[in-house]
């Protein structure tokens, strides 16, 4: 508890909420644009999205997305699902072994961080 308090005192209230609002995937791998996009797709794997929607929801610039988008497609992380007008829609490629490992990694990270948080809460309760 004291250690957590000391750590949190170092951060402003905006930074604290940012820490708690981040996904576990981004806590570990950072906030680079490609991490934000992969995290967005892992969290929203049921639907397909246009590049404009991906950039907006991942909170990155449209031109930034285009800098690495072809690599994500070539790696098979995403797959094109359909075209609506001029917009091409993409979805996380759940058949990709790489994507399966990314999802497993995300789950493992989440479980570990959750266990750590539960253990911290137990220490607080028993203090």
Image (cartoon, rainbow, N blue to C red):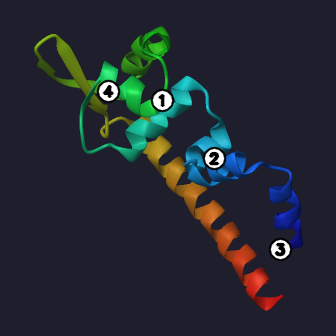
Q: CA distance from mark 1 to mark 2?
A: 14 Å
Q: Earlier in the sequence, mark 1 or mark 2?
A: 2
Mark 3 vs mark 2, foreground winner is 2
Query: In the shown orientation, is residue 18 left or right of residue 40?
Result: right
Residue 65: image location, x then y, percent: 45, 16
Q: Is residue 50 above or below residue 95?
A: above
Q: Residue at x 40, y 33 (%)?
A: 57
Tell whether label 2 touches label 4 (CB within 8 Å).
Answer: no
Label placed on residue 18: 2
Determine which residue is flagged by label 4. Answer: 53
Label placed on residue 81: none
Q: Earlier in the sequence, mark 3 or mark 2?
A: 3
Q: Residue at x 62, y 55 (%)?
A: 20
Nearer the observer, 14 or 92: 14
Q: CA distance from mark 4 to mark 2?
A: 22 Å
Q: Quadrant of the C terminus?
A: bottom right
Determine which residue is flagged by label 3. Answer: 1
Q: CA distance from mark 4 to mark 1?
A: 10 Å
């Amino acid at each position: 508890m004291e250690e957590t308090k000391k750590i949190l005192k170092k951060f402003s209230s905006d930074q604290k909420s940012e820490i708690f609002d981040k996904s576990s995937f981004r806590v570990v791998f950072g906030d680079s644009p490609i991490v934000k996009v992969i995290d967005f797709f892992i969290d929203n794997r049921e639907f397909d999205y246009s590049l404009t929607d991906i950039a907006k929801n991942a909170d990155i610039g449209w031109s930034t997305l285009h800098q690495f988008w072809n690599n994500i497609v070539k790696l098979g992380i995403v797959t094109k699902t359909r075209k609506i007008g001029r917009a091409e829609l993409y979805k996380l490629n759940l058949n990709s072994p790489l994507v399966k490992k990314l999802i497993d990694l995300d789950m493992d990270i989440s479980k570990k961080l959750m266990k750590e948080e539960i253990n911290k809460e137990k220490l607080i309760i028993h203090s």
